[in-house]
Image (tube, rainbow, N blue to C red):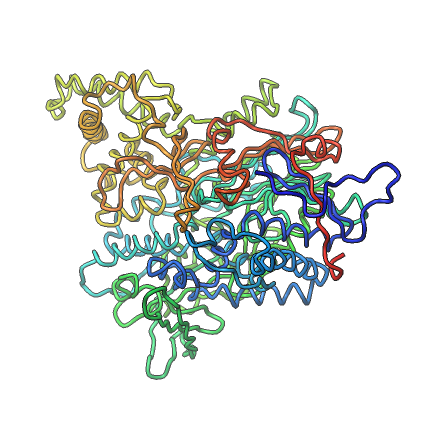
Amino acid sequence: MLLPPLLGSCGPAEGDPGPEPGVVDVYVDAQGVAHVYAPTDASLFWASGYLQAEARLAQMVLLRRRALGRQAEVLGVGKVDEDELSRIMNFRDLGARDIERVREQHPDDYALYEAWVAGVNAYIEELASDERDRPVGLGPEGLDLIPEPWTVADVGAIAKLLMFGNSNSLENELLTTVLLRIDPTLFDALELPLPAYPIFTLPPEHRPAPGAALPLGLGNLALPPAPDVDPRPTIAGLKRLHETLAEFSVEGSNAWAVAGAHTATGGPLLANDPHQPMSSPSIVYATHLDSKSAGGNYAVAGFAFAGSPGVQLGHTQSVAWGATTGTADVMDLWSVSVNADAQTVQVGDASVAYVPRTETIGVRGQSDVVLVVDEVPGYGLLLGDALLLDLGIDEAFVAGADRRLLLNWTGFTAGNELPAFMAMSRSTSVDEFQAAADMMEVGTFNWLFADAQSIAYRSRILVPDRGSPSAMAIPFSMLDGADASSYWSGAYLADALLPASRDPAQGYLLSSNNDPYGFTEDGDVRNDPFYFGTFFLPGFRAQRGDDELRRLIADGSVDVAAMQALQTDNHLTEADMLLPVVSAAWAAVASDPDLAQYEGRADIESLVTQLEGWDRRMAADSGPAIGFFVFANELARVTVGDEMSLVFEAVVGAAPAFPLKFSALTITEAYANASVLLDGTPEALALAALDATAVWLADRYGSVDMSGLRWDAIHKTRFESPIDALTWGDVGTAGSVGSLNQLTGRYFDANGDVAPEFISKHGPMFRSVVAFGPEGPRMHYNFAPGNGGSPNADFWGDLVDAWVAGTYVEMPFAREDVEAAAVETRRLTAPEPFQ
């Protein structure tokens, strides 16, 4: 049911002088997008705050509690781990510092945040006074509360939470450290940085020259001695840490831009599908804000992160932009000696005092949890007592006997992300947009952007300058705190070194969380001109995107439909690597006596034949897609799973693309030291994985015949909320780990067994293609589950089917198009301070 207009229908009659001061016209289209037209910037932001709260307040409350570490107060003991992380990282105070910096340096932006917060609070006041019924999620079926008033500091805390998620490498660095503890030889052989495919974001003419080759090896990487203890409690603790950090995983965003010289319309095309947890409601809120037509500064449409003012991803009248996570390395861990009696930590040769901070977490139905967080001014904070111990991680096993873990993150200082987003929403050219992107300091985004004339790429944040890579301590695992040279000096990589490209000769730009520079092409980060990062995703998606963009440009067929098809493309380049191995393995059975056990196996022969005839697409109606998914994961288990021992399951849970990469590069002997990893011939290992696949298929379906099976019957995407009443549920989906249409269904369950269904909780929160034409940029998009925020309101889950099918709609932008598309019209009146 559509809500009635607050102050009558909008649209003045002919001859009407127009709305009163502060009167805002709102048009809601069939997708639930509110198009907001206001006479001033302040009234625009007030109205947008009111409307977002009206649609999403229960979700906003959850996000605020997540950022402030106050979920357990209302959701119980199951949220204590997440609350502890938020209190340890101190998003509350960090966000307040960010906001204070905005107030001092960007007072106009700060005033608009105040207006937005006032709009949110206007809706909260209506709930408190019983003018409105509480939405689902805030009533007895959910949190059962009237939210506390919003503050501008809350905006900062939520933003800091999001920036942490965008720059977090804590889990990866702990995993690599534990893997080194268990088997440093194995870690060396894996060549962690080596991509599956050498596809890089910067075009050749914009890449730095590579350094001279160095001998294979880990280089300057030494860990303090660890006690001889059972590592299994630590592995279990790492799994709990992953659950705590699950919403901060980097699993599959894509963005690309094609120059107008190669498109059907002669204007650039820009595509983006950023990946986040598939929450219910969606983590993003679609909106269109316009004060510019009345003389203000904003005319912007797209998506805001829930709980955030403005638009973070979208387009203005002249510029469009999208983003992927940049995976720059802005976080490090050190093993340090601590004198608990003196409350000091040894930093190189210096003794530095640490400062305890007490945090009290309320827990519904239970006693409070009290944390003591030890902060080391200028160096970060000590993790152990406040985080690792509660998760069951043995700090001595990780850090060494009588040592603790010290964490530093560039986000511990006041950041500049909020005004950067505001400047993006005012940009009128690629030059202005890049100037806004260059304000970023913590958010590790790859920005792809365009105007009518140009396409561009930029990733600018504060990356610690760790010195010459050939001499530095390798920073992708724990560092030795006794080494004074391993600490950050306070210097950052020069802006000129950070990735940037404009109008490349190849006619397109592509980012799929892959290495921007090409530094990892040789599997080594020690021989480069500078160090930027390590944990780039493997390149399975980047290879497919690069292949297809080259093909489309060569064919002269780049249009909106082609971009949409590419965003929903289900082809697996991983299958391109592995299926020749499958064929070679089966062919070897007849001639290799060591493979005699597989002779006469009609089930394996049938499985191989079906995979050889498969189109290598993880399509919804594909049966062989199931067989390949099982095979690829079983291959990872038999190639690197036994060598990685107890860590394997933790790595699969944390970053499923990496074990698949390790396995593919091992079985194809792309690693220089693949023999260290291969416990048998590639043929024998491939056949062992095929055998396991045949057994699984027979147990599950009665035979290996996959002709009547559907991938989407077992591969599903889950839209969930901490509040059961707001959980939308599951839907069968195409795509997989490593396809451009990436949905990261998990093969293993929490116990290391094959899961009964392969559930993805991460995916493209929206897909958008922006086309530039004579009227400017126009966005074609889909997103799930939709713009609604409550099951008893409009637009709840109404866009799931279109998202699954890859069906797009255009977001109207010109006012006449907006009015024509409206299914509801309203007027709001901002109070006098915000008129």
Q: Where on the picture, by quarter, is residue 810? A: top right
Nearest to the observer: residue 353 or residue 695: 695
Left or right, 83 with reference to 177: right
Instruction: Tell me if I can see residue 479 in this picture.
Output: yes
Query: Which residue sits furthest right?
Result: 15
Outermost residue, bottom direction? 342
* Image quadrant occupied by the N terminus: top right
Q: Nearer the viewer, residue 176 or 758?
A: 758
Q: Quadrant of residue 483?
A: bottom left
Q: How many marks?
A: 0
Asked if residue 737 lies left or right of residue 131, the reply is left
For image coordinates 18% across by 62% down, the residue present is 229
Percent position of residue 275, x then y: 48, 41
Up the image or down, 14 lies above or below 137; here it is above
The C terminus, quarter of image: bottom right
Give the percent coordinates (x, y) of residue 303: 59, 43
**Residue nearer the viewer, 479 or 145:** 145
Residue 536 in view of the camera? no
Q: Is residue 600 left or right of residue 368?
A: left
Q: Residue at x 26, y 42 (%)?
A: 749
Quadrant location of residue 98?
Answer: bottom right
Measuring from the top left, give residue 506's x and y in whole percent: 60, 30
Residue 25 horizontal/vertical position (percent):
73, 44
Along the viewing direction, whichever of 309 and 826 lies nearer the viewer: 826
